[in-house]
Amino acid sequence: MARDQHISSAERLLSYSDAVFSIITTIMIVPLGGETVEEIKSTEDLLEGVKSIWFKILVYATTFVIVASTWSTHTSLFGYIEKVNESIILLNLGVLMASTFLPFSFLMFAEHPTEPLAVVLFCASIVIAGTLMAGIAWQAYSRPNLLNEDEARYGEIKSKRCRTMLMMLGKPVLALVAAGIGWIRIEAAWALLVMVLLEPLLRQVIISLYYFGKGDGDAGCKVLLPSRLLVETTGTLRTRVYSDGVYAIIATLIILDICVENVPSQEDDIAKHGDLITALKHDQHVFMSYAGTFITICMLWYLHHSIFYRIFAENPLLAFFNKLALMFAGLLPIVFKITGEFGKEVSAGDAAIAVQLNAGTVLFSSIWHLVMWIIVMKNKSKLLHRRFDDVDEDKYMNTFMIIRLCVYPTISLLLFLLCFVPTWKFDSEVINWVQISTPGVFIIIKIVRNCVQVRLPYVWR
């Protein structure tokens, strides 16, 4: 009875964890932002500058994948756990602490790839986080009253505990071996770290070989079939919370640069321009870029919300494309700075390149939403809410949803291609006004949809 007093619902712990993971996922863009733009400016050529930072962008993308993978493992683990005790809470805080160290340790590894110590620091973060999650699994399965009803009721608890702990320890074991080998041969450590990224795939291969070894060929084949990416489903609550956190942080990160660099100083800016209004007008293109970028991020969240409002479950393929959408959206703060810095340099050709970078990033941030909806429509019986699954009788809902999801990819692709027209001189003002006015397109689509719904209730049936 005394132990039960220290047991609580896992809901708040998971909300806090999702918030921390969403911050870790996007925070890598902050140190890259200022350094990257300054490095590009030093080259005096935007295209050459962008080429020079490809490795830093790769570092951001890889860190995003690592942290998002850690979050996915955390989500899988707590999918079986309904309640938590103080031991699990403390172990989870340790997981979060080790995870917050991942961006620093990987950045250190990226800057000093041939230093064994840098490899060890990065591997240590993975080992500690994974080992602590294995400890959470041990705690939960040692006390079945902490598990959800289905997990506690069906099957052998000991075998489930063993299965879950092996799943948690896959990455730590590979990382531990990589850390040891790093002192002997650094190239072999790199290869093992690549295997850490591919650990979920390797795990499926090992499980398949296990079934084949037992003589169960059918089960072994099923594990490797791509169709399992569509068949297996989980709830969407944690994905929604995590995605909301990422979009919220991205939307607010862009104001940091304005606060630091664009507040007129009494000694320099006002003395130079004469008054506060003139000083602010000097940076008006930066404020316009901020408004356009903020609106774009908010509208991307709106489209994301429109999809997840209609589904109650997700499959691994949908979750993968959701992470892709979030990863490209995370680049928008850097694109915002580049557009603000180079968007007015029409004569040098940098303005058109800045517009193309902006449009291309928005394109890849939005196109995956359309892919996600196509996946939902192909698996509507498993993913779509019952109130939306009768699409054959209400086809306009699906049609207008696709139209909305095509708005940003279409506009972004059009802007990107128009920049190649030599007679059209694009600058940041064009894309800023396009981004600011794009919500009007969604308002028009909504009005047309409502008119169709009211006046032609049986259209397309």
Image (spheres, grey):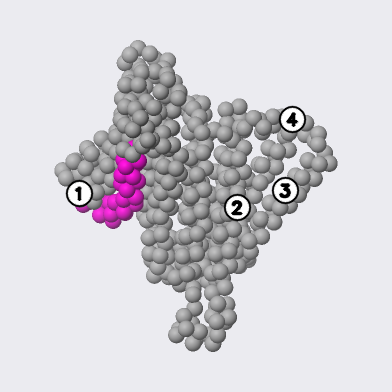
The residue drawn where x is 39% and y is 18% is 155
Amino acid type, label 1: Pro
Query: Helix or strand or loop: what does disc 3 sit on?
Result: helix
Give the Cα separation between the discs numbered 4 and 2: 28 Å
Give the tally of numbered discs.
4
* Residue drawn at x 36%, y 18% as measured from the top left: 156
Residue 112 included in the magenta stretch of the image: yes
Of marks 2 and 3, which one's residue comes earlier in the chain? 2
* Residue at x-position 66% and y-position 33%: 388
Viewport quadrant of the N terminus? top left
- Residue 458 sits in which quadrant? top right
Kind of residue at badge 2: Met
**Which label sits in the foreground, 1 or 3?**
3
Local packing at callout 1 (Cα closer than 10 Å; few below 14, some 14-19, many 20+) is many
In the rendered view, tell whether residue 203 sits above or below residue 371. above
Q: Badge 4 is on which residue?
A: 393
Q: Position of residue 113 (x, y in %)?
A: 26, 51
Which residue was labeled with disc 2?
Answer: 299
Residue 364 covered by magenta stretch: no
Q: Which residue is mark 3?
A: 446
